[in-house]
Amino acid sequence: MKLSGIKIFIASIVVTLLISCASTRTVNYQFNQKYPAEKLKADVVLLKKILEANHPSLYWYTTKDSFNTRFNTVLNSITDSLTEVQFRNRIAYALSIIHCGHTSVRFSKQYTKLASTHIYPAFPLSIKIWPDSMVVIGNLFAGKSVLKAGTVITSINGKNIETITTAMFPYINTDGYATNYKYQVISGNFGGWYKNVFGLEKNYVVEYIDSIGNKQQTTITDFTLKKDTTAKKDSVKAVVTTPLVKIPKIRPIQLKRSLNIDTKASIAYMRLTTFGRARLKKFFRQSFRTLHKSKTKNLIIDLRENGGGNVDNFVKLTQYLKDTSFKTGDTVEAITRKLAYNKYIHPGIEQWFNLNFFTAKKADGNYHQQRTEEHYYQPKKRLHFKGKLYIITGGYTYSAASMFAGAMKGQKNVTIVGEETGGGYYGNTAMQIPDIILPTSHLRVRLPLFRVIISDKRIKDGRGVLPDVYVPPSSQAIKAGIDIKMATIKKLITGNTKP
């Protein structure tokens, strides 16, 4: 069969990319192994070159001098061999100067695969942290410690909130200057961050506020999960003599999205933890059909756990709720069609295809997704929700989720409740995000290829989407087990008051 010229051209590119693919595995890999300093330095130099050649927003929120200084600092800090964990921390520190939440670093696939088989001592407390408070939300020594849920902590081994966050923040990427995301990330794994930044400590002197408001002090130890060695291989299994009760399983997809309706109060609660793969288009269609039939007057959409996903899913949800036409972005642009150092970029073929067939070069020299920039989406006429809409946001509200919150902000029937989103209000760098796989460490660095300015009418101040009703965390609410943001929304609904 004779191939046309274009097919031959594409085939040759595909073959070239396949041949040039760099190795993504370390031969005879040992978990968290050390790598020679000179080879790790080569990884850093290469990463800097790849970012400079392909990343469209390196200097959006930082200067070129600051970028160069940060990478030079990392290079100079590598004076001896490092473990993968140690090197990952240095790469994270280098990347955070970009202020791009989508430009982050992950461990190698080999490290990730083996991580669950290696048990290390852990910091025993789960802690929620925000600018002026550290509060216990969980304790691995439950029942054996005075540090219960809701206890306010003032310091750990002499380190107060400011000392802890100042040390941890430089290792966490975020869009612009929306530091609320950093607080959420630390809260999500406080023990892990404490270990990575300060190292393992056998004992922890914790200062806290007791139930009557006095400052107290206690010492706790690290926690080690021990394997159960009591069971014998040849032990006889117990015989079940009572009938088994079949417990219905919660499908994983139900953990990603759900809809519950209180028909008496005319309140619906939609929980969305992702805009990714969760059969969302069908879920939205069924949900808004149900809302229409039940004549629900109030809809709450909870995006506190939603880190984003597919932009198409954000569009579909917005069409059911927004009263006017809208665009994904006024500007969606890449700085190159030919990915430099493509042998280290995976999947390179897919990215090359999209850059070359779905962009056009404009007068500014950049490559634009012109259709995306010009296309307006129209609200759905059928099943369009016209009641009161309350959107709950927080630091984890990111990417497509923050785009949704930003698109709905300011509409007459919409109230955003909670905290500033982690995703930027003005724009972000995303759309296509392949991995850079570094040749020695095989760390995976995400490389967003398109700069998105959602609306040129918005101010580029590095902030996320700000709520209409700000509801910060509360130690009293944590202690009482109250969802303070939901409680606030219910007051707005039942009190029929405007924020």
Image (cartoon, rainbow, N blue to C red):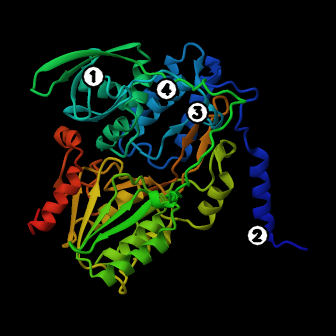
Residue kind at label 1, given as amino acid type? Thr
Q: Is residue 128 left or right of residue 87?
A: left
- In space, the residues marked 3 and 1 are separated at their CA atoms by 30 Å
- In space, the residues marked 3 and 2 are separated at their CA atoms by 47 Å
Tag 3 residue: 116
Q: Position of residue 263 (x, y in %)?
A: 26, 75
Tag 1 residue: 163
Tags 2 and 4 touching, CB below 8 Å: no
**Looking at the image, which residue sits at the far front?**
241
Q: Residues within 10 Å of mark 2 (few under 14, many from 20)?
A: few
Mark 3 vs mark 4, foreground winner is 3
Q: Position of residue 413 (x, y in %)?
A: 20, 73
Q: Is residue 214 left or right of residue 413?
A: left
**Helix or strand or loop: what does disc 1 sit on?**
helix
Q: Answer with the quarter of the image where residue 124 lies.
A: top left
Quarter containing the C terminus: bottom left
Mark 3 vs mark 1, foreground winner is 3
Residue kind at label 2, given as amino acid type? Ile
**Helix or strand or loop: what does disc 4 sit on?**
helix
Give the mark nearest the N terminus, 3 or 1.
3
Q: Residue at 62% of width from left, 56% of height from top?
A: 351
Q: Residue at 62% of width from left, 50% of height from top?
A: 339
- Disc on res. 90: 4
Q: Residues within 10 Å of mark 3 (few under 14, many from 20)?
A: few
Residue kind at label 3, given as amino acid type? Ser
Tag 2 residue: 6
Give the mark nearest the N terminus, 3 or 4.
4
Q: Residues within 10 Å of mark 4 (few under 14, many from 20)?
A: many
Q: Position of residue 118 (x, y in %)?
A: 59, 26
